Image (cartoon, grey):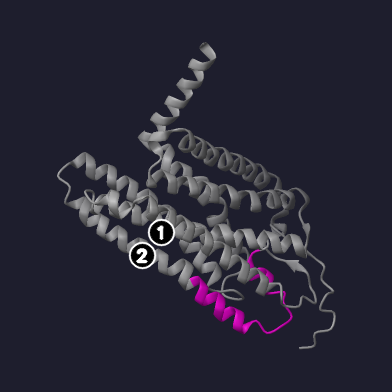
Amino acid sequence: MKRQNQSSVVEFILLGFSNFSKLQEQVFGVFLVVYLVTLMGNAIIIVIISLEQSLHIPLYLFLRNLSVVDMGISAVIMPVMLVILSTEKMKISTVGCFAQMYFILLFGVTECFLLGAMAFDRFAAICHPLSYPMIVNKMVFVKLVTFSWVSGITVATVQTTWVFSFPFCGPNEINHLFCETPPVLELACADTFLFEIYAFTGTILTVIVPFLLILLSYVRILFAILKMPSTTGRQKAFSTCASHLTSVTLFYGTASMTYLQPKSGYSPETKKLMSLAYTLFTPLLNPLIYSLRNSEMKRALIKIWQRKVDLHTF
């Protein structure tokens, strides 16, 4: 293919839900509420865990990192989507598109490994309760969190730089909600076969492998729960595992289906819905799944609120 006009595309147009223009006002309202609730829910978690000393243990420190990631991915995606819904289309510069793709990948990959680390933490706590403090000590926690963030930065840097090294000769309309890799790659006027191999391999390593390790951890956890003598203990553990697995399946399942088929497979509308699942609903549900139903988080919130009341009283 000829590569003249390699720099002809200096901006992209995000089409969003242009096929459903009559519903855009209603969808805008729903997404705005979801965005505000997501930010508020995750911010509350970060503040509670940061202020309450009793929650400075691996389980909740992992959760604080997860909330930071969820707030980040919402802040990168949702404002753009709200603009698209209010104007039907949105122009975004190549630099802006690059930045959005970079942070989506950074936060997405980091969340993959954080969810894996949280599953390992629960496995150690439930299956090896006596040796848990030694298995998941402070050093192990720091290494797991550092590995998650460094992996996200590395994948985001390599993949985004590679995608935008391709020439974009036109058209410049991205039939998607935001600058995600697969729909942007469809506009490249070059052979992307090598990149698709890399993307497939990267998805296996960063999404499928952690997901399988999480499932393996939960199989072991399930057997440990079934051996518990207390019915109440079993019910509580089952509830926690079911909630976590729901979130994990939603996030990993839709992310893998999106990135394992970069240029074909599902229709654009289906891809949009799958993207919404792990970029919109997972950050919204995580505060409910991991903490707001948690008795220790509720007690910590009450203690912080009581301290604030006492300070104002005196």
Mark drawn on residue 116? 1
Q: Specify the amino acid type for callout 1.
A: Gly
Residue 183 appears in which quarter of the rendering?
bottom right
In the image, farthest residue toward the left: 229
Query: Which corner quadrant of the image does residue 299 belong to?
Result: top left
Task: Answer above or below: position of 184 versus 147.
Answer: below
Quadrant in the picture for the N terminus: bottom right
- The residue beneath circle 2 is 213
Residue plotted at (62% across, 63% down): 269
Q: Is residue 182 magenta?
A: yes
Residue 80, given in percent of the width and then of the height, sits at 70, 52
- Residue 277: image location, x then y, percent: 53, 56
Asked whether residue 155 is in view, the answer is yes
**SS at circle 2:** helix
Q: Position of residue 169 (x, y in %)?
A: 80, 77
Looking at the image, tell me whether mark 1 or mark 2 is earlier in sequence order.
Answer: 1
Q: CA distance from mark 1 to mark 2?
A: 7 Å
Q: In the image, residue 119 lies at what x, y percent?
A: 36, 55
Which residue is nearer to you in this view: 249 or 21? 249
> Which residue occupies the foreground of this view, 185 or 308?
308
Q: Is residue 313 left or right of residue 121?
A: right
- In the picture, measured across the screen, residue 302 lies left or right of residue 199, that is left
Residue segment shown in magenta? 180-203
